[in-house]
Structures are given as structure tokens and as C-alpha cells.
Image (cartoon, grey):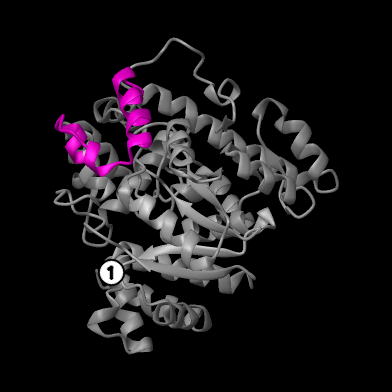
Amino acid sequence: MHVVGLITEYNPFHNGHLHHLQQSLHITGAEASVAVMSGHFLQRGEPALVDKWVRTEMALAAGVDLVFELPFPFACNSAPHFALGGVRSLAALGVVDALCFGSESGRLERLDRIAEILVAHQRTIEDETAVLLREGLNYPAARETVLKRHAALGKEDELGLPNNILGIEYLKALRIEQSGIRPDTIPRRGAGYHETHATGPIASASAIRARLSRGEAVDALIPESCGKILAAALHRGHCADSERLFLALQAQLLQDEDRLQNIYMVEDGIDRRLSRAALEARDFAEMAKAVKSRQWTLTRIQRMLMYVLMQARKGDMEAFVQSGPLYLRLLGHTAKGRSVLARMRRRKTLPVIGDPARSQQTLGRFYQDRPETRRLAEEMLRYDLRATRLYSLLCKSFPGEARNQDFYQPVRQV
């Protein structure tokens, strides 16, 4: 059975994702699909619209066969760490033949050539990028400027576009890992990643979230089976609220500034800017914009705010990034997905966690000869459990159940 891997957020699952899923199966000749999906906090530094179980149900209803969670340290991080975490998770399954991603260019050979240059000249590119950062450029602009020197880029390469950026990082990760997973790409259709207006059947997730925030219908933009699941969750109020997020961050930032100095990515005196923004801003968007500078992109500031919310310590996060994912958290599967799980049993290179209540035994058995790695895996999982508890505080409505939902929500099955 050929299996294609997808690295996703599904925030929420929409017609563009359905096109990507169907085309991925078609062009790779795969019979089953596996998604490694972000949990409650996403790559651009924001909470997901709805929780990871609702998004898992949407993915399964649309035809994805297996859904695993990408741990927080990789899901809410820069493109290289996000991509490497996703690729390592797919590789650890032991059954994935291909990775298919969307890109604005749709030109696999060109993207792969750029990835090859980035890997081969990593030190030089990092040094030249650092020089431009000191001159005041932000990271994406500095990286693109340096790459133009080394790769003879043309206008058609459009390295600044988000799916091209991630695509190159996936290809880099496959090279770094010397993975046997075969890459492929399909051109992104419909609206661009950041476009907030929907003019056809395929709109960006940003446009769909914008329409939902205005109380507008999105039925035509989401597969019918997924739309029903999303509508039910939104009706119950099980969705993130920006006002609650702002208050939760203020509670952290209005305490002593010294508490921020050990938070991941909080550096170069930005702790003072964060504290001042919490005093003066009136909402989350205003807070993030107040901290933004020429060198710091809005996305990086938003991620930093998520680290503050999560109290993500520098030492922990750096150790996680160095180790890569240390477990595979199963969120849901179809009947075909169960067959893939059966094939994984002897091929996987990381432990599978379905029930966090049994995680200590699972991790203990797998890492019995590596106690330090076991400790790190347990700490990584604690971050995911913390993310769930904090996400419950951000929801518009709380059903009155325990906030440790990871211990109460079953693996979804279709």
C-alpha cells in the first residue's frame, strides 16, 4: 500500500485542502494518506480556530486516513523547525512513500535546487543573512536577498510567498534527513495564502476565518461533510476568542519583566517592548503591532506571544528543536488508516501515543535504555497537554468538563 504524507494545519479544512488531498493521492499513486497536523497553536503564532479534535474530524470526513499531531515546539515555530518536525514525524511512521505539498510555483525541480543550495552553503548563507539583519532587514527579506546572490533567482521564483517558503523547507528537511520519502508538489489554486476575500469556490483559510468573524456564510468554501462539523463546533462556542487571548497575555506580561527573560525567543530587550505593549494596547492585534519593528516580523512577534502564554522556556524549546519529535500522537483514523497503523507496528521509529494516560508506560518501554531522552519526551508531551489546557481558556464557551481534555477525548474513528 503506497502512502502519501501531508503536513497540515487545516484551520479550517476547506475546498483547497480537499483539492490538495485528492491531487496528492493522484499524482503520487498513493492508496492512503497520513496528515501530520498542528495542535492548538499554529505556525504563524495564533491559536487554531477550533480545537485539534474538531479539525481531525473534518480531515477524516474529507478523506484523510490518519491524523497525527505535530508537537507544539514544531507546530508553533519558524518555517525550518515546522518543516523539519513534520518531515521527521512522517519519516518515523516507517510507511510513508511520498510527501506532497502545495506551492505557488508548482516547480519541484526549481524549488529543490534552491533547497540544495541552502543545505550546501548553509554557513555562508547564515553569515551573510546575519550581516543584513544587523543592517535592519527583517529575516525573510534578508534571506531572499542572500539567496538571490547564490541561486540566480528570477521573478518567477517568488521566494517570499508562504507556500514556496514552506516547500523549500520541506525539501531541505528531506535532504538533511537523507530521507527516502519522495517529494512532489501541486500548484496552489484559488486565493493566495494571505488573501482575506473569497471570490470563488477555493478561498484561503484566512478569508474563511475573516468571513466567519463577520458572521457570513462559508458553506460554498468548505466540503459539506466538514462544514457540518465546523458549524456544530462554532455553535457550541468551542472556538478561540481573541479577547480572551488578549486578557490571558496581559495577565502574563503585566507581571515582572524579569519573568520574560527565560522565555524562548524573547531577546534583545524586547521584553520591555512586550511589557509596554501590554500596558497600552487594547487588543491582541494592537499589542502585536506595537511590538513589531523593522527587524521583527509580525509573525515572529505573534509566535513570541504564544511562547509567553505557554511559558515556553528557552532551554526546553532549544532541546526539543535539537531532538526533533520524540513521539507520534495519534488523533484519528479511518478503516484504511487502521491498516496503515498495522503496517507501522514493526516499522515505526518513534512510540505512538493514543491515550496520554498511558504515555509514561509507552515512553518508558520505548526509551528504557535512554532515560534522558525519555525525560525529554515526557516534557515535550507536557507542553502539548499545557497547550490544550490553555486553549480551553481561550474558547468562547466551556462545556464544564475537565480542562485536561487530552485525557478525555478519544482517538477519532471513521
**View extreme (right): residue:** 369
Q: Secondary structure at mark 1?
A: loop
Q: Which residue is mark 1?
A: 160
- Count all numbered tags in the image, as a single digit: 1
Q: Which residues are magenta?
A: 210-238
Q: Residue at x 48, y 12 (%)?
A: 401
Instruction: Find residue 120 and report its horizontal and vertical position in percent.
Output: 52, 83
Q: Is residue 213 magenta?
A: yes
Mark 1 burial class by Cα count in 10 Å: few <14, some 14-19, many 20+? few
Asked if 89 appears above or below 181 in the picture, the reply is above
Displayed quadrant of residue 385 = top right
Q: Is residue 357 magenta?
A: no
Quarter of the C terminus within the rendering: top right
Give left or right: position of 4 versus 191: right
**37 and 344: which one is in front?**
344
**263 and 374: which one is in front?**
374
Instruction: Find residue 140 and report its horizontal and vertical position in percent.
Output: 31, 67
Asked if 217 appears above or below 295 in the picture, the reply is above
Q: Residue at x 38, y 40 (%)?
A: 306
Instruction: Find residue 97 and report its horizontal and vertical position in percent.
Output: 62, 64
